[in-house]
Amino acid sequence: MSNLNEFDIATEQYRTYIMVNKVGQTVEYRIDEPVTLFIRPGGSTHRVLDSKGIVHCVPAPEMFGSVIIWENKDPKNPCEF
């Protein structure tokens, strides 16, 4: 049994993480067609499952600082949760 909370994010077309690496450079990581967001209670590192069945592990934002941007498939409803 998993100790992860799951959230349906299938309404998002994509999800892009913009992070600053150790030397101050901006790095972008994009996930197309995300389906499920997994978060461990008390943790900030999380996982995202995409429509192809690939799981992406996203490091904790406090590591280097990050911003998450996304666009929902329905522009009238920009954020599901």
Image (cartoon, rainbow, N blue to C red):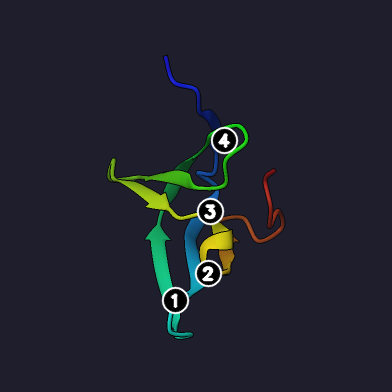
Query: Is tag 3's residue or tag 4's residue first in the polypeptide sequence?
Result: 4
For image coordinates 54% across by 34% down, the residue present is: 40
Residue linked to disc 1: 21
Residue 70 in the image, given as x and y percentages of width and height: 56, 63
Please say if the residues under marks 3 and 2 sit with CB atoms less than 8 Å apart: no
Position above or below: 25 against 15: below
Asked if residue 43 lies left or right of residue 22, the reply is: right
Q: Which mark is residue 12?
A: 3
Three-letter amino acid code at disc 3? Glu
Q: Residue at x 71, y 58 (%)?
A: 76
Residue identified by numbered label 2: 64
Q: Amino acid at mark 2?
A: Phe
How much space separates mark 3 and mark 4, taking CA atoms? 12 Å
Q: Mark 3 and mark 1 in contact? Answer it, CB < 8 Å.
A: no
Quickly name the residue at label 4: 7
Separation of residues labelled 3 and 2 (CA atoms): 25 Å
